[in-house]
Amino acid sequence: MAEVKGSMGGRIALKESTIYLGDNGRAFCGHARCAGATAYYSGRDLSGAPVFPLEHPDDIRHALEFKIVCERCGKAPSLIVTP
């Protein structure tokens, strides 16, 4: 599998189609503008804690039930699998 590189040349750790949760309860999508550069490239938030993807179907169902969306752009998690 080819390594995905960002516009600045660094390895991208997050998928734009996924919603992530930070250790402070913040929800954000994998887009650099929403996640921030630290999480986008390292998969960790500013405090160094790993961010957790909402990828399992049960997690996504609960997120939809509780209306968890990206706090910046409003993107909701999807049960539809995208490449």
Image (spheres, rainbow, N blue to C red):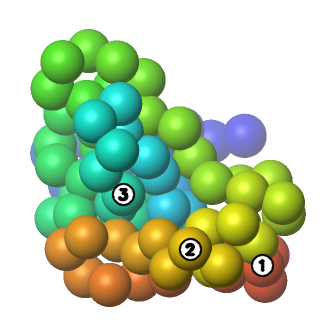
Disc 2 designates what residue?
66
Q: Which quadrant of the rendered structure holds the C terminus? A: bottom right
- Indicate which label's residue lies in the foreground, 1 or 2: 2
Residue 9 appears in the rendering: yes
What is the CA distance from the residue labelled 1 to the residue labelled 3?
17 Å
56 or 43, which lies in front?
A: 56
Q: Which circle marks residue 8 in the picture?
A: none
Q: Which circle marks residue 79 in the picture?
A: 1
Near mark 2 (Cα within 10 A), the count class, few <14, some 14-19 or many ≥20, is: few
Q: Earlier in the sequence, mark 1 or mark 2?
A: 2
Which quadrant of the figure has residue 51? top left
Identify residue type, mark 2: Phe
- Indicate which label's residue lies in the foreground, 1 or 3: 3
Which quadrant of the figure has residue 37? top left
Q: Residue furthest front?
A: 66
- Image point 19% across, 33% down: which residue? 38
Q: Position of residue 10 (x, y in %)?
A: 27, 34
Identify residue type, mark 1: Leu
Identify residue type, mark 3: Ala
- Image point 50% across, 62% down: which residue? 19
Disc 3 designates what residue?
27
Q: Earlier in the sequence, mark 1 or mark 3?
A: 3
Q: Residue furthest right?
A: 57
Q: Position of residue 70 (x, y in %)?
A: 35, 71
The number of numbered badges drawn on the structure is: 3
74 or 82, which lies in front?
A: 74
Which quadrant of the figure has residue 71? bottom left
Near mark 3 (Cα within 10 A), the count class, few <14, some 14-19 or many ≥20, is: many
Residue 42 appears in the rendering: no
